Image (cartoon, coloured by chain):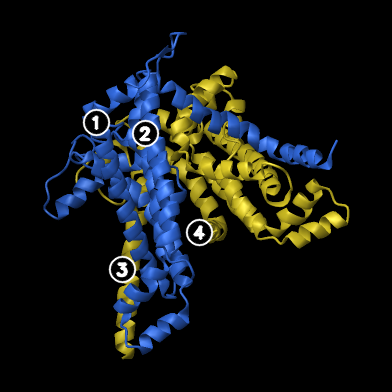
Chain colours: A yellow, B blue
Amino acid sequence: MALYARLKQSIHHLVLAAASIMMAFPFIWMVSSALKTNEEIWSFPPTLLPEQALWHNFMDAWNAAPFGQYVWNSFFVASTIVLCQVVNSAMYAYAITHMRFRLKGVFTAAIVLGYMIPATATYLPSYLILNELNMLNSYQGLIFSNCVSVFSIFLIRQAFLQVSGELIEAGHMDGARHLTVLFRILVPLTKPFFAVIALITFIEQYNNYFWPMLITNDPNLHLVSAGLRSFFVEGGAYGLKWPLIMAASALTIAPLLVLFLFTQKTIIQSVNLSAGATKG
Amino acid sequence: MTSKFMNDIKAFGFMLPALIPLMLFWFIPFGYIAYLSFMEWDFMNPVKTFVGFENYQALFSSKKFWDTVRVTLWFCAGSVIPIILGGLSLALLLSDRLKGSFIYRTLMFSPWVTPTVAVSIVWSWIYEPRVGLANTVLGWFGAAPVRWLEDPHWALVAVLIVTIWKSAGWSMIFYMVAIRNVPRPLLEAASLDGAGSVKRFLYVTLPLISPTTFFLFIVQTISALQAYDQINILTQGGPAGSTRTILYMYYQSAFQSYEIGEASTVAMTLVLFCLLLSLLSFWVGKRTVHYNA
């Protein structure tokens, strides 16, 4: 019986290990290809390990295009958006959960309705509006057009609904103003939600491609995804310098994998929260 | 001034920072695109011409549009079902408290955090027809090489593989949480009644995790309807339109051929799809899904 259980467990591990390696293999393949020479990469059959690891390919790729600028753009734009979204979502969610006013139902319904409109469908008119505002091709445009999210408002509303009204009442009795109640009482109580939203929004915006690509054509404003893609298709790189392309991809992917390793718990928690939110 | 009025003003002040961008980039665009779908316009011309339902008639009678609908349906079915089944199987494999499952979980979930553009570029190297990894693996099994991204029969499969690979780990996490929340006593009671592990799964676990399945179905379908990055990098809607989804057609007519009327009409069909799905989710959610874990 013990032997049987052991055997069963080993098989279990084997299956899991195989599945994990399959999932991670594209990353392994990417790094291995990045370390090869241009000749070696075209030889058949392909080998897992390079004859000689060319670590300088990473340096060469980094210098072949302004990747430093792209990373900075992504980082700056994503962080600013996170900051804006956290503040304005918290305020909106506070109003529709803990303030008394007329038309409250309408403003709550607006969020649920907004949740159903696919963002991509609005890209054409949003582009035209951004053009009217003279914000195409600018950081302002990139940030302003992304600085609100119905999803964040929806999730924070869910969190605020769980906080008892008595606590808020008590705050008001002590003469606290709405802003104080919101930022001193509610936000600290629902911190995990904010951590999750900040992290998910950051990753999404850092990786964002479709919309930023539509509204900017200045290479100095490229986020990492658009920057990497233009390195991929331009500069004679397309289909010719695979090791460099793989090295550049690895440089783009690595920071996110590192961020993920350190924040795994929070990201996985997001599942608990958003799964819970849909039940309400 | 009444205090009621003051309350309204205060609340409005709180909502304003979100309301401005929400109006400008969410609600006004929605009305705007509905309006544009009744116009003929090409961006350059200052004049928009009202054409009534002509755009809709033209769209619904064009073969190109129905081809994109077909591709979209295949894309949705081909990504959503494997993502859900794959996520569920991985979660079941990981659900026993096995040593080291933390590492497996990390590896399987990692594709989800990485930029779609970057991983699509990596996959386009894997799909390289002559020395790419995909064809090498096919070769081990004695299968003939495939021109993944240039063959109209395979291009959609290639895009689907990337899409599934990227999201399976994500749905796995949802299932892991759901499975952990299944009450132990229920499973034990079923065991006492003589139910084996298969029966326990089918009659206890599966019904109890149905809200998760349903949630994943809706979320994944909506994201499949809006998939752009991987299609743009891998195939750009080609070859021969075999990977052109409704969204991709919208992008092409709006930003490549500047047929604003057609693009807006296409966008309206996309909105309609999503609205129907959301309504369905409310309706089904209220009726059949088992909420009480």
Q: Residue at x 47, y 39 (%)?
A: A117
Dot 1: element: loop
Dot 2: element: helix
Type of amino acid under label 1: Gly
Q: CA distance from mark 3 to mark 2?
A: 43 Å
Q: Kindly check if marks 3 and 1 are in contact, taking CB atoms under 8 A apart as contact.
A: no
Q: Nearer the viewer, mark 3 or mark 2?
A: 2
The answer to whether any part of residue B197 appears in the image is: yes
Q: Residue lying at the far top in this picture: please name it.
A: B46
Q: Nearer the viewer, mark 3 or mark 4?
A: 4
Q: Kindly check if marks 2 and 4 are in contact, taking CB atoms under 8 A apart as contact.
A: no
Q: Nearer the viewer, mark 2 or mark 4?
A: 2
Residue topped by disc 4: A275
Q: Residue at x 31, y 80 (%)?
A: A8
Residue topped by disc 1: B241
| Left or right of A112 in this view: B253 | left
Label 1 resides on the chain identified as B
